[in-house]
Structure formats: structure tokens, C-alpha cells
């Protein structure tokens, strides 16, 4: 029963006030050990794989179809690897594999871990804005990020992308999220649906992320950064697929 509950048994909707995403490039050999065998990395130029930090300010998050007043407002942080999965009928899907999830709410931690496999923990994260500046801070998670959303943004120094058009492919949202059972070979697929997803490049003035301070992930190159504002979003009920080895 508990296992079934964790498999996204119903659709969920929310309004995204903002979604700030910083994407980092690492050699394929660094990220390959972090994903299960059912998945493969989404690779750029035969050498780069990507890990992203997404900080999302949600409003009225609730089961789809419930009235908005029954929802709750949360900040959600996800650490995700860009991956591909070939399903049981041979269709290749681009999506995300979640390494870790955080929230500013014990309530979200409880229900998030009841209905997903995303391993939520509660942290002291906050998002503040003044003029065109957006700042994300968390002492517990080692997050200290400041971006300028108003200036014409250049790609971060050292980015493997030649321009924003090339980077746009990795600016999401990748429609699918995958959770894998390595023993049974089953893959849980959750599809996200959105409207008017227009990522705006931002200039990163400062970025610290404790998650990237592990020995394996040190040296990650900031590849792109963007923000999306004021969009409705929902996640469909999870679907189980049996991986063909």
C-alpha cells in the first residue's frame, strides 16, 4: 500500500510564481555512476552531461481538480540529472532523474515523501527579490545564489554552449521525470504539463551550492541559467513501464 502511494497515484497542479534553474556541465564519467541502469545520460558534444538546480516558488499546490484555496504555497528545490529513457515500445524520452529534493515546509516534506520517491528534506531556504535582483539563500543547504533578471545576459564563462540558442535545448522543462526500481526493472514515469514556458536567460552574479561541494561534483561548470515566471503547471498521474534490458 505504501509503495503504491509513493508512485504519484494522482495528478497534482500548482502555479509557479517563479522557477530559477542553474544548469552545470560535468564530464560524462562523473555523472554516469549517479544514474540507474535503466537510464542514459543526455550528452552534449560526446563529452558533457548536465546536472541542474531548480528553485521553484509554488502557489496553491494541490491534487489536480481541487479548488485553489485547498492548496499550499511552498518553495521546492530539486537537484536533477538530464537523462534519456527508451520505454518498452521503443520510444525515447528526454527527462530528469532526481538526486535530491528540498522544501521550506515540514508539511511538504511529509506529503512529498508519502506520494513520491524524491527524498524531500526540510531546509531554511528563502527567495527574495529587489528590482531585477533575485537571491536564494539557505544556510543549511549551503545555497547562496544571486542573479540579475533585467540585464541582457551573456552565457556563463566556460559554458560548453556557443550561444543561448544552443543552450535553450537544456533550458527545460524536460517533460518527464523518472524513478527506477533497479530490482524489478520498472520505471515510474511522471509527465509534467505546462503553458507559456518561456525561459528568460539571467546573469549569475554569485552562485554557491553545497550539493556540488562533494568531491565527485567539484569542478562543475555553470552552463546556463534562466528564470520562468507566472505559469500554471501540473504533473500527470505516474505511469509504470517495464524496462527492456
Image (cartoon, grey):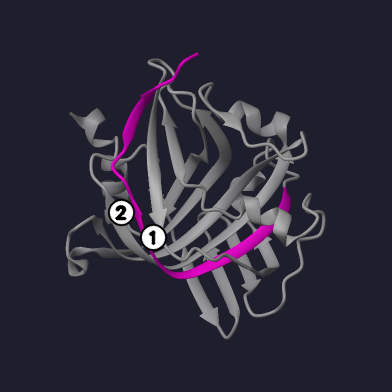
Question: Magenta segment, which residues?
Answer: 221-245
Q: 227 left or right of 69?
A: right
Q: Is residue 58 visible?
A: yes
Task: Say which element carries label 1.
Answer: loop
Q: Residue 143 is drawn in which quadrant? A: bottom right
Q: State yes or no: discs 2 and 1 in contact (Cβ < 8 Å).
A: yes
Looking at this rendering, what residue extends furthest in the bottom direction?
131
Which residue is pictured at 31% across the width and 38% down the height? Answer: 238
Q: Is residue 55 above or below residue 32?
A: below
List the residue tagged with mark 2. 108
Q: Nearer the viewer, residue 142 or 217?
A: 217
Q: 107 left or right of 186?
A: left
Which residue is pictured at 68% across the width and 49% down the height? Answer: 24
Q: CA distance from mark 2 to mark 1?
A: 8 Å
Q: Check the picture and name the quadrant holding the N terminus.
A: top left
Q: Is residue 116 magenta?
A: no
Q: Residue 116 is drawn in which quadrant? A: top left
Q: Is residue 230 magenta?
A: yes
Disc assigned to residue 204: none
Residue 149, position in %: x, y? 62, 75
Which residue is pictured at 47% across the width and 47% down the height? Answer: 175
Task: Say which element carries label 2.
Answer: helix
List the residue tagged with mark 1. 104
Residue 228, position in %: x, y? 52, 67
Q: Residues within 10 Å of mark 1 (few under 14, many from 20)?
A: some
Q: Residues within 10 Å of mark 2 (few under 14, many from 20)?
A: many
Q: Nearer the viewer, residue 206 or 53?
A: 53
Which residue is pictured at 57% across the width and 72% down the height? Answer: 135
Amino acid at each position: 500500500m505504501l509503495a503504491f502511494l509513493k508512485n504519484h497515484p494522482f495528478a497534482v497542479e500548482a502555479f509557479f510564481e517563479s522557477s530559477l534553474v542553474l544548469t552545470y556541465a560535468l564530464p560524462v564519467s562523473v555523472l554516469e555512476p549517479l544514474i540507474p541502469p535503466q537510464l542514459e545520460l543526455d550528452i552534449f558534444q560526446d563529452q558533457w552531461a548536465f546536472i541542474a538546480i531548480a528553485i521553484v516558488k509554488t502557489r496553491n499546490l494541490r491534487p489536480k481538480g481541487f479548488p485553489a484555496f485547498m492548496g499550499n504555497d511552498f518553495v521546492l528545490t530539486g537537484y536533477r540529472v538530464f537523462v534519456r529513457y527508451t520505454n518498452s515500445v521503443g520510444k525515447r524520452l528526454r527527462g530528469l532523474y532526481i538526486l535530491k529534493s528540498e522544501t521550506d515546509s515540514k508539511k511538504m516534506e511529509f506529503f512529498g515523501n508519502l506520494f513520491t520517491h524524491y527524498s524531500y528534506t526540510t531546509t531554511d531556504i528563502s527567495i527574495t527579490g529587489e528590482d531585477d535582483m533575485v537571491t536564494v539563500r539557505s544556510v543549511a543547504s549551503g545555497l547562496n545564489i544571486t542573479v540579475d533578471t533585467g540585464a541582457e545576459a551573456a552565457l556563463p564563462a566556460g559554458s560548453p554552449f556557443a550561444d543561448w540558442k544552443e543552450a535553450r535545448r537544456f533550458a527545460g522543462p524536460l517533460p518527464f521525470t523518472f524513478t527506477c526500481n533497479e530490482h524489478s526493472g520498472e520505471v515510474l514515469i511522471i509527465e509534467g504539463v505546462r503553458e507559456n514556458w518561456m525561459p528568460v536567460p539571467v546573469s549569475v552574479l554569485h552562485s554557491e551550492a553545497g550539493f556540488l561541494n562533494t568531491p565527485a561534483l567539484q569542478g562543475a561548470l555553470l552552463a546556463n541559467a534562466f528564470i520562468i515566471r507566472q505559469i500554471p503547471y501540473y504533473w500527470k498521474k505516474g505511469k509504470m513501464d517495464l524496462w527492456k534490458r
